[in-house]
Amino acid sequence: MSTSSTIRAATAFFLAAGLAVSLMATSALAVPLPKPAPKTRDVVQFAAAEPALSKPRATPAAGAAPEPVIPDPRRNKPASLFTTFDANQKAQAGKVSAYLSSLSTLVGNFVQIGPDGSRTKGDFFIQKPGKVRFEYDQPSPIAMIADGNSLAVRDRKLATQDIYPLSQTPLRYLLADKIDLMRDTNVVTVTADDLYISVTIEEKNPLVGTSRLMLMLGVKDNQLKQWTVTDPQGYDTTVAVYNLDTVKKPDPNLFKIDFTNYATPPG
């Protein structure tokens, strides 16, 4: 997978809509324009029985990388202005909120599927509130570091990094100290089946359009399984996490943004 493709996918799952667009437009990255989004993304009506998620191909062995569940693109129909949820849906969203709020640290591995189907892996470290680091496996030179205030998208090979406000990232909900999704976000869908509880949050930006974040927890173990970010153009980036450890304390130095050895392009 090329460096530019990794940056595109990494940025797509982490940055808010406006920042993602601006990063992808940066000439220094030389990122090619994507192909048009699949027409199925424009489908508004579909059968109620149509599943929102594809089923996993197989249950991975302990410690092995999971096969990410790729959401059905047809799920992204326009949200109703008067979305209502029944008691069961509110309870399911409450479970996700309680889980996220219970975390103080989270360490593990991830598998990322980009909009073009490319697959990358790596390690991640979370220290709430607001601190996270994603390290992509070689040969990718990309790392992302949030120090509680800012997010740096770093290229170790070029020794450069781009800095963005952490408050403008869709995963700020995952990094919040405490969160009530139904109260603090614009929840547009809540679904549950035998395997997953899924909550989708929508954000509208008048300049660049609408983006969505779908969080998925396992029904049996009540642990975070994956998330999918849909950008305003309709492209999905899915990140599945595994080998999760909520006890291990990450090294605080992991969350320090290095402004000495990595040049930051002028804004």
Image: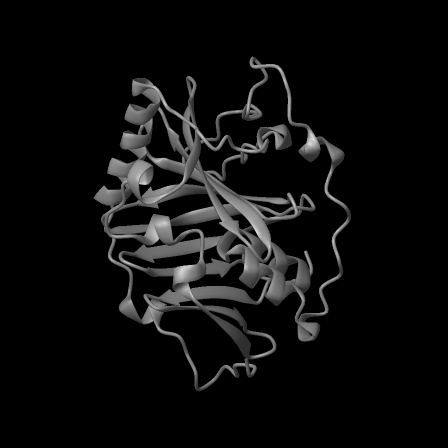
Q: Can you tell which quarter of the image residue 90 is in?
A: top left
Q: Position of residue 78 (x, y in %)?
A: 57, 33
Q: Is residue 83 above or below residue 11?
A: above
Q: Where is residue 85 in the image (x, y as percent from the top left)?
A: 37, 23
Q: In this view, does 119 lie above or below 262?
A: above
Q: Can you tell which quarter of the image residue 46 is in?
A: top right
Q: Is residue 51 above or below residue 19?
A: above
Q: Residue at x 49, y 55 (%)?
A: 14
User: Does residue 63 appear in this view?
Assistant: no
Image check: 131 left or right of 261? left
Q: Can you tell which quarter of the image residue 68 is in?
A: top right
Q: Residue at x 59, y 17 (%)?
A: 50
Residues 196 and 59: in front is 196
Q: In which quarter of the image is the C terminus?
A: bottom right
Q: Position of residue 40 (x, y in %)?
A: 71, 31
Q: Where is residue 84 in the image (x, y as percent from the top left)?
A: 39, 25
Q: In this view, does 219 lie above or below 226?
A: above
User: Does residue 20 appear in this view?
Assistant: yes
Residues 92 and 70: in front is 92
Q: Quadrant of the N terminus?
A: bottom right
For the view shown, which residue lies furthest in the bottom direction?
Answer: 260
